[in-house]
Image (cartoon, rainbow, N blue to C red):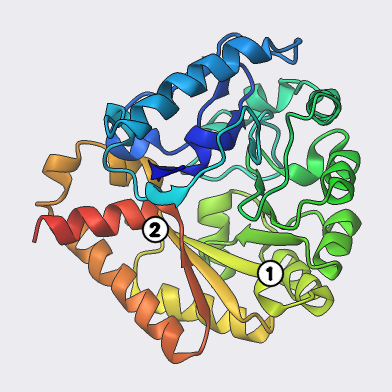
């Protein structure tokens, strides 16, 4: 049936360290995340209850009565959606351990606490979904690893192997790039895995200021090594999160793009620091800093195009860009 909805309402789950939520985008509209299973730490899931909640949202979409937290979402679209209780899109964000300490990240700002937390094992849950025919492959199927750092996640290689063997062809891994992964390299070689490495810098000092670890050269070398293995150059992307007052000059952008060229990349991603760009948005748009960051984002896109990079904007950048355009 054709109606306006999104992949996450109709077939998505976002696994968090202590809950299962619908998606990770409701904060763009300033809403709390829609929780499907609260106080969750890897226990058996009541799939009937979970799908009943999703069905309530789907029925709203069919009637054109979109839930408040979805109304302005950039991922809403008119499509002939499957009408069954299945999951074809996964966000795996169920752990907090990381090998960097980014200044814009909650995990980085309380690194010792979050690195002590033990993640539940997602693999038995995925295996149950397969056994019960809940996990489904469609042309829109998508898996994204977020959370902390995937390469330090216990059982990461086995989880990635399960997803590849199941048949997922669109698996995104967001990584610090500090630890090189043979499993990621293998997925890239097969053309099933994309790796996006958030470097956020084109110089060692800026990198240390943001990441609070000294791995700039190592990360760019790992990016170059992944790129050599890629079946399709756009399978490997370097990401630049614009952090106000830290890496927000045209020179910073140019340095980053130069590093991406040296690493022989053909695709890059841009974003804007999440909490800065979504806090008190009505006041934000009137500030000179917001105007500066908006112009810098436009500069980054235009300069990247001139250098023939394929460009991707993350949801934070899309939301911020739309906000600024709508308030001009």
Q: Is residue 69 visible?
A: yes
Vertically, is 232 above or below 193? Answer: below
Does label 1 or label 2 sit earlier along the sequence?
1
Look at 77% across and 51% down and name the residue there: 168
**Which percent across, then down, holds residue 313?**
44, 63
- Neighbour tally class for label 1: few under 14, some 14-19, many 20 plus, Cα within 10 Å: many
Q: CA distance from mark 1 to mark 2?
A: 25 Å
Q: Quadrant of residue 149?
A: top right
- Which dot marks residue 236? 1
Q: Is residue 235 left or right of residue 82?
A: right
- Which dot marks residue 42? none
**Which percent across, then down, holds residue 129?**
78, 27
Disc 2 on helix, strand or loop? loop
**Which percent across, then down, holds residue 173?**
69, 52
Front one among 154 and 168: 168
Q: Is residue 292 left or right of residue 197?
A: left
Q: Which residue is mark 2?
A: 246
Disc 1 on helix, strand or loop? strand
Q: Is residue 263 left or right of residue 24?
A: right
Look at 64% across and 60% down and name the residue there: 197
């Amino acid at each position: 049936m054709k109606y306006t909805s999104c992949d996450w309402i109709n077939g998505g789950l976002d696994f968090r360290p202590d809950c299962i939520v619908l998606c990770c985008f409701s904060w763009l509209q300033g809403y709390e995340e829609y929780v499907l299973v609260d106080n969750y730490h890897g226990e058996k899931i009541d799939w009937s209850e979970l799908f009943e909640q999703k069905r309530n949202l789907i029925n709203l979409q069919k009637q054109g009565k979109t839930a408040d937290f979805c109304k302005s979402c950039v991922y809403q679209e008119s499509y002939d959606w499957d009408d069954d209780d299945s999951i074809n899109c996964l966000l795996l964000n169920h752990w907090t351990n990381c090998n960097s300490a980014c200044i814009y990240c909650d995990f980085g700002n309380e690194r010792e606490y979050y690195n002590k937390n033990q993640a539940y094992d997602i693999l038995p849950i995925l295996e149950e979904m397969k056994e019960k025919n809940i996990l489904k492959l469609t042309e829109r199927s998508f898996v994204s690893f977020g959370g902390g750092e995937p390469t330090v996640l216990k059982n990461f290689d086995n989880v990635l192997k399960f997803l590849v063997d199941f048949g997922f062809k669109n698996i995104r891994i967001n990584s610090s790039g500090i630890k090189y992964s043979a499993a990621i390299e293998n997925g890239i070689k097969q053309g099933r895995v994309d790796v996006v490495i958030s470097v956020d810098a084109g110089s060692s000092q800026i990198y240390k200021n943001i990441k609070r670890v000294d791995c700039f050269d190592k990360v760019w070398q790992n990016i170059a090594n992944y790129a050599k293995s890629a079946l399709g150059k756009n399978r490997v992307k370097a990401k630049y999160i614009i952090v106000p007052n830290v890496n927000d000059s045209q020179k910073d952008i140019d340095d980053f793009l130069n590093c991406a060229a040296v690493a022989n990349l053909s695709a890059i991603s841009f974003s804007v620091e999440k909490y800065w760009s979504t806090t008190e948005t009505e006041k934000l748009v009137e500030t000179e800093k917001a105007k500066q960051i908006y112009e810098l984002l436009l500069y980054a896109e235009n300069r990247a195009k001139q250098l023939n990079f394929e460009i991707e904007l993350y949801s934070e950048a899309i939301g911020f860009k739309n906000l600024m355009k709508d308030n001009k």
